[in-house]
């Protein structure tokens, strides 16, 4: 009797995840609440024309460790404070056809520090045409776009993004 009950419990335990619902499969549209809308309108109203124009610019930033006193970091910080740059496009160092990937932590520290130096939220983009792994270590590796085309299945390309 005990082995039969134990076997039933094991089988049910193994099958339980199959019936779990995927709660996060469909992202909801982003909607600002009243406070968020009020903040956006007030912030936009308080920006000078020069600050508004600066928000339209995106500049490249290498995802690497930079000392906050280094000339490279000071130039990025000055781009935010002096020219009011509103966004950065993240990439890595390249020499010819070779990309030198970096650690995700280095990218996070740099981008978070730049965000702290900015009085407005920064928009961060990245050069990830083959996924994060082409720029940073520790991410899933995806093939070139031609591989998706060669597979002959549109679903693969759509799932990749």
Image: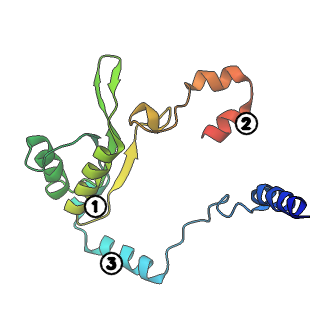
Q: Are marks 3 and 1 in contact (CB under 8 Å)?
A: no
10 Å crowding of disc 2: few (<14), some (14-19), many (20+): few
Measured from the top left, where is residue 88 in percent x and y?
A: 31, 47
Front disc: 2 or 1: 2
Residue 93, relative to residue 90: is it above or below?
above
Residue position for label 2: 155
Q: Which of disc 1 and disc 3 is earlier in sequence?
A: 3
Q: How many marks?
A: 3
For marks 2 and 1, the one nearer the N-term is 1
Q: Is residue 53 left or right of residue 140?
A: left
Q: Are marks 2 and 1 in contact (CB under 8 Å)?
A: no
Residue 49: horizontal and vertical position, in percent? Answer: 23, 63
Locate residue 36: give its quadrant.
bottom left
Q: Which residue is mark 3?
A: 42
Question: x, y percentage for residue 149?
Answer: 66, 23
**x, y percentage for residue 28?**
62, 65
For marks 3 and 2, the one nearer the N-term is 3
| In-front residue for pair 12/136 | 12
Q: Considering the image in quadrants, where does the N terminus appear?
A: bottom right
Residue at screen point 47% across, 39% down = 139
Under circle 1, the secondary element is: helix
Q: Residue 8's quadrant in the figure? A: bottom right
> Is 1 left or right of 69, judged from the image as shown?
right
**CA distance for labels 3 and 1:** 13 Å
Classed neighbour count for the residue bearing mark 3: other residues with Cα under 10 Å, few (<14), some (14–19), many (≥20): few
Q: Which residue is mark 1?
A: 52
Between residue 128 and residue 120, name the one nearer to us.
128
Tag 2's secondary structure?
helix
Q: Which mark is residue 32?
A: none
Write down the quadrant of residue 90 in the picture: top left
Marks 3 and 2 sit apart, C-alpha to C-alpha, by 44 Å
């Amino acid at each position: 009797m005990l082995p039969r009950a134990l076997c039933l419990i094991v089988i049910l335990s193994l099958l339980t995840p199959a019936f779990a619902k995927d709660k996060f499969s469909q992202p909801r549209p982003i909607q600002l609440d009243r406070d968020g809308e009020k903040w956006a309108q007030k912030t936009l109203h308080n920006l000078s024309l020069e600050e508004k124009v600066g928000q339209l610019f995106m500049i490249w930033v290498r995802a690497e460790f930079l000392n906050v006193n280094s000339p490279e970091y000071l130039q990025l910080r000055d781009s935010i404070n002096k020219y009011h740059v509103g966004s950065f496009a993240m990439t890595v160092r390249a020499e010819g056809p070779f990309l030198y990937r970096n650690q995700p932590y280095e990218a996070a520290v740099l981008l978070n520090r730049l965000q702290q130096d900015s009085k407005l939220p920064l928009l961060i983009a990245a050069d990830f045409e083959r996924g994060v792994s082409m720029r940073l270590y520790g991410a899933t590796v995806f093939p070139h776009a031609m591989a998706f085309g060669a597979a002959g299945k549109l679903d693969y390309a759509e799932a990749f993004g």
